[in-house]
Image (cartoon, rainbow, N blue to C red):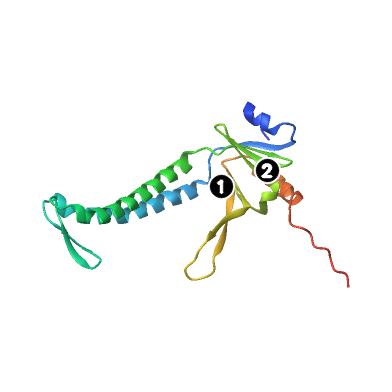
């Protein structure tokens, strides 16, 4: 495995811990996830954009805008813009959400993953002076390898509860991506071994009949 010149701050954090591997991830996450966010944001933006065009077009043509508020026919124009405040605010809110998603998609697409150092106790992530720690016991042991994307996905025990309308709530675990790295097989073996060694799940004794 190619030896990296690690930043001094990162070396200080590592201290005397045994280093199993050290890599620099070229991406924050796989490109496919970032593309998914960008495509979803564009689809999201298309709806309020069409709505805003249809809603404001008569106004800029010097005509009255006709719409309903609580099933009550309402008319607005340049001399009476107050009725448009609430529907306009909703359209702007949806546009802001879509733009924010688009920007976030671009950020995740272009942002580097930073240094990942695996030690006997944890994985340390270092990027632009920011450091994150992931103890081995935080991982479930579910590991996914993608040679085409040069990505290792490690499933964490923590996550979020996703509410479903038609069915029980679903737990969605967080995923740590080491994306755009080399030596995938070697690092994957190390990760599996360390996770197994630090598994907090108690082993139940066998019942002998």
User: In the figure, 135 relative to 164: above or below?
Assistant: above
User: In the figure, 208 relative to 177: above or below?
Assistant: below
Classify 10 Å Cα crowding around label 2: few (below 14), some (14-19), many (20 and above).
many
Mark 2 lies on a secondary structure that is helix
- Looking at the image, the residue that sits furthest to the right is 209
Q: Are marks 2 and 1 in contact (CB under 8 Å)?
A: no
The percent coordinates of residue 157 (x first, y second) are 64, 54
Q: Quadrant of the N terminus?
A: top right
The percent coordinates of residue 6 (x first, y second) are 64, 29
From the viewer's perspective, is the residue at label 2 or at label 1 nearer? Answer: 2
- Looking at the image, the residue that sits furthest to the left is 62
Q: Residue at x 53, y 42 (%)?
A: 28
Left or right side of 201 for 161: left
Can the viewer see residue 107 in this picture?
Answer: yes
Q: Residue at x 48, y 71 (%)?
A: 166
Can the viewer see residue 3 in this picture?
Answer: no
Query: Which picture quadrant has residue 15?
Result: top right
Q: Residue at x 58, y 50 (%)?
A: 175
Q: Quadrant of the C terminus?
A: bottom right
User: In the figure, 54 relative to 167: above or below?
Assistant: above
Left or right side of 190 for 177: left
Mark 1 lies on a secondary structure that is loop
Query: Which picture quadrant has residue 135?
Result: top right
Marks 2 and 1, the one that precedes in the sequence: 1
The percent coordinates of residue 61 (x first, y second) are 12, 51
Query: Which picture quadrant has residue 23?
Result: top right
Q: For mark 1, what is the residue?
A: 148
Marks 2 and 1, how far apart at CA? 16 Å
Classify 10 Å Cα crowding around label 1: few (below 14), some (14-19), many (20 and above).
few
Q: For mark 2, what is the residue?
A: 187
């Amino acid at each position: 495995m190619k030896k990296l010149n690690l930043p001094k701050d990162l070396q200080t954090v590592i201290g005397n811990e045994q280093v199993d591997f050290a890599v620099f991830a070229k991406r924050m996450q796989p490109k496919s996830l970032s593309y998914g966010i960008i495509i979803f944001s564009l689809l999201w933006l298309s709806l309020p954009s069409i709505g805003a065009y249809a809603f404001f077009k008569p106004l800029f043509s010097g005509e009255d805008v006709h719409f309903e508020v609580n099933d009550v026919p309402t008319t607005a124009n340049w001399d009476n813009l107050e009725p448009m405040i609430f529907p306009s605010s909703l359209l702007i809110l949806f546009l802001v959400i879509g733009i924010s998603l688009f920007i976030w998609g671009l950020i995740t697409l272009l942002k580097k993953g930073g240094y990942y150092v695996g030690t006997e106790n944890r994985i340390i992530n270092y990027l632009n002076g920011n450091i994150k720690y992931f103890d081995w016991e935080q991982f479930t042991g579910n590991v996914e390898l993608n040679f085409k994307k040069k990505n290792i996905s490690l499933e964490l025990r923590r996550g979020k509860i996703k509410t479903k309308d038609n069915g029980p709530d679903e737990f969605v675990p967080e995923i740590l991506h080491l994306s755009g790295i080399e030596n995938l097989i070697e690092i994957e073996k190390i990760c599996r071994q360390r996770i197994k060694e630090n598994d907090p799940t108690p082993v139940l004794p066998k019942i002998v009949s």
